[in-house]
Image (cartoon, rainbow, N blue to C red):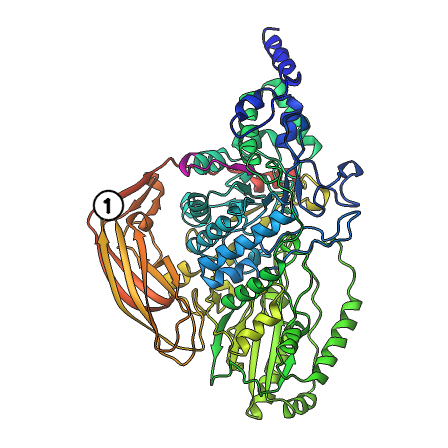
């Protein structure tokens, strides 16, 4: 009885509205005190999501901005409007049509994040962020559900295209630059998916078992950089479990590390339908549950009533959300004009795309092509170019420029007869494809067209050069398959072999364009082409940007943000990807996303990507950081100076070739011998030159703090920079080090003393499975 009376009083107090006070940035705690429990629940749980045929009719809400992934509830009596959250990493994902409105709301489809990372250009990334921000602002979006910065742990991850890199420094810096650009427009960001969402297979159940060191040095590092440098308004927690507990339900991840160690003061939202306990999410510091389901509302109500969730915790969740909502354009009463600067953004999308394309190979100056040369353009993707990936990373843009269209507009002469054959072949084959089960899943590919040698001979006779574009699409819900995706299909390989033979026999060049979103196998066939250019999925300006590079208007300056291995099994993660699925009951909050419990062990620890390849001396097809140019550069005059806890590393780049171009210069550091296994070298800085004319030089200066050299010592629960000799290496890629200099750290430095976190809570899935089968 004693317990019940205070409980009843609490409930009565929290349900009886106190005099409404209008919300301002100054009075949030007082306003929260005056909210009813239902109003608080309406702040921490989104309005829901309507999928025709999947979610109940009751979930149908009137979207303020159609097609935006999330909406909050308005609370009129405190002056809180509805807040709009929309994807995503390659452009604003909203529906172009709005009921009762003839106007179309198309967004710019920018290049995928992987291409942006390949630019290694933080100023450009920030400008692209500004453009996203401006489009969000004028289309009525308050918070952008981007950037996504999970690590490319394995080439087969279906969403790698949405992510930047296998390296956390590059990913974190890119994300920070993007966040700054967006938020300067008054629009919030949500850095996602926090953390270790490195696969799509069983993504909503999978338990990723990861050492604390790998978490801190690899999977959290990029987020830490983005949080500290750019203060994103929100963080989106990941679907997966980490060491036995859902990411969205881990207090140590969302509170101890994110807030207490990194001083984060925005709010955390779940990924859509993530986790299995609203109450644990609230307690962990996962403030907002998206998109919101009825059960979460009931669970919170019940937990407040029985005391298992304190009103204090709920109030804190609500306050954190309101702290951010009061910064939004909607709250400030901004009237979007529906007219973002699409024309300017189109130019920017084209420029960005040219800056991130990577020239893997260029023999006998196959590229750039001469305007007088006639091109035989092969490959479906030359005509049906993939501008981005699918799922929430997709964009509804006004129209794409395919590669053939780019060539046409820019007056490159190409074989029209061949083009006609391809175009009607693609149309017929596409018509035969079964309809997609669900609009968001990856597109089905059509087979490459086959050719007889005779046909190819006659095409080769009437053209000067052959270009074959190989395309790939991937996206949410599915990882890529090894065969017919990572590996080329038989038809693709045959086309490459035949074209190489036929064109080379006639002393004509053969060029391959890789219109891909992630790593594919290149080692077995790369010798067959004179030039290979990765165009990535370059956004809506694809064809124009490809023209810019192929014609030599712009010299390529992109470099790989990940390794292209000889064999996929050379990646240590391939041993454990995508983990094991257990024969246990399905889990999930919504029918189309149910999955069986699964577990994946990150046995490779910190040895992800080049950290493994370089340390274990494993050959690659193309190493991390690699990319050619139409010109050549000399690296010289390395100078390392130490000044009270920081190192200044300066060097000079000279354009020694014949074309104007930019160069990406990378700084790697090797640590002294230690008991802790360390990668042979790690990326610690990167800079891109301006466009250097032939003969021109530029001096670049990197600044590295002694703290940046620290590793995480789990046994001492601290980030420590060990004493000894550090080798600073400046290179054109991780395996092309040009200049080396050493510097000494005289004594050990404890950079930060933290608590051990992310303890593994065994899930014992194996035993549970055995018990179930008894
Ligand atoms: C994705 C998120 C996305 C959200 C909203 C989820 O399925 O994982 O990246 O922001 O949907 O569309």
**First to last magenta residue range:** 260-269
Residue at the spot x=72%, y=78% of the render?
422
Q: Is residue 167 left or right of residue 90?
A: left
Q: Is 185 contained in the magenta span?
A: no
**Whether residue 48 is situated above or below residue 220 in the rendered picture:** above
Residue at the spot x=60%, y=47% of the render?
137
Percent coordinates x, y for residue 76 in the rendering: 68, 28
**Whether residue 76 is situated above or below residue 667 in the rendered picture:** above
Q: Is mark 1 within 8 Å of ligand 1?
A: no
Q: Residue furthest left?
A: 746
- Mark 1 is surrounded, within 10 Å at the Cα level, by few (under 14), some (14 to 19) or many (20 or more) other residues, namely few
Q: Is residue 264 left or right of residue 497?
A: left
| Residue under numbered circle 1 | 748
| Secondary structure of the residue carrying numbered label 1 | loop
Percent coordinates x, y for residue 308 in the rendering: 58, 21
Q: Nearer the viewer, residue 718 or 694?
A: 694
Is residue 609 in sight in this rendering? yes
In which quadrant will I find the C terminus?
top right
**Whether residue 651 is situated above or below residue 48 in the rendered picture:** below
Percent coordinates x, y for residue 330 in the rendering: 62, 39
Q: Nearer the viewer, residue 475 or 347?
A: 347
Is residue 153 in sight in this rendering? no
Residue at the spot x=61%, y=14% of the render?
10
Q: Residue furthest top?
A: 1
In which quadrant will I find the N terminus?
top right
């Amino acid at each position: 009885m004693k317990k019940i009376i205070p409980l009843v009083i609490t409930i009565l107090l929290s349900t009886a509205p106190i005099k409404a006070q209008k919300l301002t940035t100054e009075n949030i705690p007082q306003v929260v005190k005056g909210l009813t429990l239902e109003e608080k629940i309406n702040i921490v749980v989104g309005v829901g999501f309507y999928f025709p045929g999947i979610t109940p009719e009751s979930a149908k809400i009137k979207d303020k901005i159609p097609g935006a992934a999330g909406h909050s509830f308005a609370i009129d009596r405190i002056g809180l409007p509805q807040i709009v959250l929309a994807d995503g990493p390659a452009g604003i994902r909203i529906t172009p049509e709005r009921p009762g409105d003839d106007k179309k709301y198309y967004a710019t489809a920018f290049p995928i994040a992987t291409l942006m990372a390949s630019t290694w250009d933080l100023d450009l990334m920030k400008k692209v962020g500004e453009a996203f921000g401006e489009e969000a602002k004028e289309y009525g979006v308050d918070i952008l559900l981007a950037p996504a910065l999970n690590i490319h742990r394995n080439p087969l991850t279906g969403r790698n295209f949405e992510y930047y890199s296998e390296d956390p420094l590059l990913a974190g810096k890119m994300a920070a630059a993007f966040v700054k650009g967006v938020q300067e427009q008054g629009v919030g960001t949500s850095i996602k998916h926090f953390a270790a969402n490195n696969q799509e297979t069983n993504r909503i159940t999978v338990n990723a078992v990861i050492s604390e060191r790998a978490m801190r040095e690899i999977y959290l590092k990029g987020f830490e950089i983005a949080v500290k440098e750019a203060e994103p308004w929100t963080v989106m927690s990941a679907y997966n479990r980490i060491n036995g507990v859902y990411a969205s339900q881990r207090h140590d991840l969302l509170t101890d590390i994110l807030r207490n160690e990194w001083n984060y003061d925005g709010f955390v939202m779940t990924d859509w339908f993530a986790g299995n306990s609203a109450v644990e999410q609230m307690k962990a510091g996962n403030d907002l549950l998206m998109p919101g389901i009825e059960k979460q509302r009931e669970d919170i109500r019940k937990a407040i009533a029985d005391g298992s969730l304190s009103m204090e915790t709920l109030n804190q969740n609500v306050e954190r959300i309101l702290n951010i909502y009061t910064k939004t354009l909607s709250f400030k009463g901004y009237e979007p004009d529906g007219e973002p600067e699409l024309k300017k953004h189109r130019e920017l999308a084209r420029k960005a795309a040219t800056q991130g394309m990577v020239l893997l190979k260029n023999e006998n100056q196959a590229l750039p092509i001469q305007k007088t040369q006639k091109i035989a353009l092969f490959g479906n993707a030359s005509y049906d170019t993939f501008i981005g990936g699918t799922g929430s990373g997709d964009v509804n843009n006004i129209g794409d420029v395919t590669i053939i269209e780019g060539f046409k507009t820019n007056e490159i002469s190409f074989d029209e007869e061949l083009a006609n054959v391809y175009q009607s072949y693609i149309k017929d084959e596409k018509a035969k494809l079964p309809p997609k089960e669900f609009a968001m899943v990856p597109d089905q590919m059509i087979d490459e067209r086959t050719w007889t040698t005779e046909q190819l001979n006659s095409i080769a006779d009437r053209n000067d050069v052959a270009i074959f574009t190989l395309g790939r699409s991937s996206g949410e819900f599915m990882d890529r398959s090894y065969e017919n995706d990572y590996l080329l299909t038989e038809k693709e390989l045959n086309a490459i072999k035949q074209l190489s033979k036929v064109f080379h026999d006639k002393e004509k060049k053969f060029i391959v364009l890789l219109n891909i979103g992630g790593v594919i196998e290149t080692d077995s066939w790369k010798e067959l082409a004179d030039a290979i250019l990765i165009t990535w999925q370059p956004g809506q300006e694809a064809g124009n940007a490809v023209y810019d590079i192929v014609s030599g208007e712009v010299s390529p300056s992109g470099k790989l943000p990940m390794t292209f291995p000889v064999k996929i099994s050379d990646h240590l993660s391939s041993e454990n990807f995508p983990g094991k699925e257990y024969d246990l009951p399905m889990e999930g909050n919504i029918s189309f996303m149910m999955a069986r419990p699964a577990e994946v062990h990150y046995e490779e620890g910190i040895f992800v990507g080049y950290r493994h390849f370089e340390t274990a001396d494993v050959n690659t097809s193309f190493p991390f950081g690699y990319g050619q140019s139409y010109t050549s550069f000399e690296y010289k005059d390395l100078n390392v100076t130490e000044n009270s806890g920081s190192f200044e590393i300066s060097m000079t780049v000279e354009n020694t070739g014949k074309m104007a171009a930019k160069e990406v210069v990378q700084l790697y550091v090797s640590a002294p011998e230690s008991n802790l296994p360390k990668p042979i070298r790690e990326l610690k800085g990167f800079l891109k030159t301006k466009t250097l004319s032939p003969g021109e030089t530029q001096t670049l200066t990197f600044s590295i703090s002694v703290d940046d050299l620290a590793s995480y010592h789990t046994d001492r629960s601290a980030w420590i920079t060990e004493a000894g000799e550090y080798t600073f290496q400046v290179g054109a890629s991780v395996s092309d080090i040009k200049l080396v200099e050493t510097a000494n750290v005289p004594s050990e430095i404890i950079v930060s003393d933290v608590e051990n976190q992310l303890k593994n809570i065994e899930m014992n899935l194996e035993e549970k499975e055995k018990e179930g089968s008894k």
